[in-house]
Image (cartoon, rainbow, N blue to C red):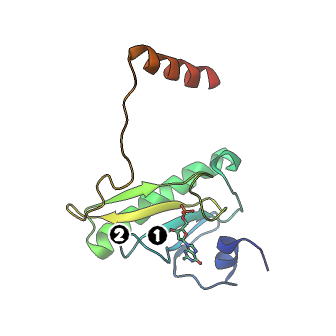
Amino acid sequence: MTSCLFCAILAGDEPGAIVLDEPEAAAFLDVRPLFPGHTLVVPRLHVAALQDLPDGLGGTLLATARRIAAALRTALGAEGAFVALNDVVSQSVPHLHIHVVPRRKGDGLRGFFWPRTRYDDPEHLERIRAAIAAAL
Ligand code: DGP
C-alpha cells in the first residue's frame, strides 16, 4: 500500500472513477467537482510538485488534458474547459494533477478566485520581467 492517495487510486487500492488509464498518465473524476465531469489528469509516476516533473512527461500530461477537454465537449456538451494546476500552494494532494473542468457560458465560474492586480508603474513591470528572464 502506498501513502499517496492518488497512487493508491491508480493502483486500485482506493476507489476512483477512472476515465483514462494509460502507461504514462491516467485521469479520474474529482470527488468534489466544480461541475460534474471535473477530471484530474495525473502522471502514473509519483511526482509531487511541478519542478519534479521530468521534461518528457509534461507534454504527455498536457496532451492528456487536451484529450479530456475534448471528451468533456463530446460527452457532456461542454463549450470549453478550465484547465489548472495548483503547484505546492493550495495543492491539497501532493501528487501532481491537472484539473480539467467542463465550462459553459454563464456557468458562474468567471473570475471566482482570480482577483486581478496592477503593476505600480512601468518600472515595476520591468523589474519583474527582468528578474524572471534572468532566472531562466
Ligand atoms: P488541489 O486542491 O488542486 O490539490 O486538488 C485536489 C483535488 O483532489 C480536489 O479538487 C479534491 C480531489 N480529491 C481529494 N481527495 C480525493 C479522493 O479521494 N478521490 C478523488 N477522486 N478526488 C479527490
Number of callouts: 2
Answer with the quadrant where ligand 1 appears in the image: bottom right
Q: Amino acid at mark 2?
A: Leu
Tell me what residue is drawn at x 64 percent, y 63 percent. 24
**Quadrant in the picture for residue 8:** bottom right
Task: Find residue 6 and name its label.
Answer: none
Up the image or down, 113 lies above or below 31; here it is above
Secondary structure of the residue carrying tag 1 is strand
Location of residue 129 in the rendering, given as x and y in whole percent from the top left corner: 50, 22
For image coordinates 66% across by 52% down, the residue present is 49
Image depth: mark 2 or mark 1 in front: 1
Q: Position of residue 114 (x, y in %)?
A: 38, 48
From this view, report whether residue 83 is shown above or below residue 122. Answer: below
Tell me what residue is drawn at x 34 percent, y 66 percent: 102
Quarter the N terminus occupies: bottom right
**Mark 1: C-beta under 8 Å from nearest atom of ligand 1:** no
Q: Residue furthest right?
A: 1
Q: Residues within 10 Å of mark 2 (few under 14, many from 20)?
A: many
**Tags 2 and 1 touching, CB below 8 Å:** yes
Instruction: Relative to 97, say whether 121 is above or below.
Output: above
Q: Residue furthest top?
A: 123
Q: Which residue is mark 2?
A: 72
Q: Is residue 36 left or right of residue 46?
A: left
| Residue that label 1 marks | 39
**Amino acid type, callout 1:** Thr
Q: Which numbered disc, 2 or 1, marks the residue that appears first in the sequence?
A: 1
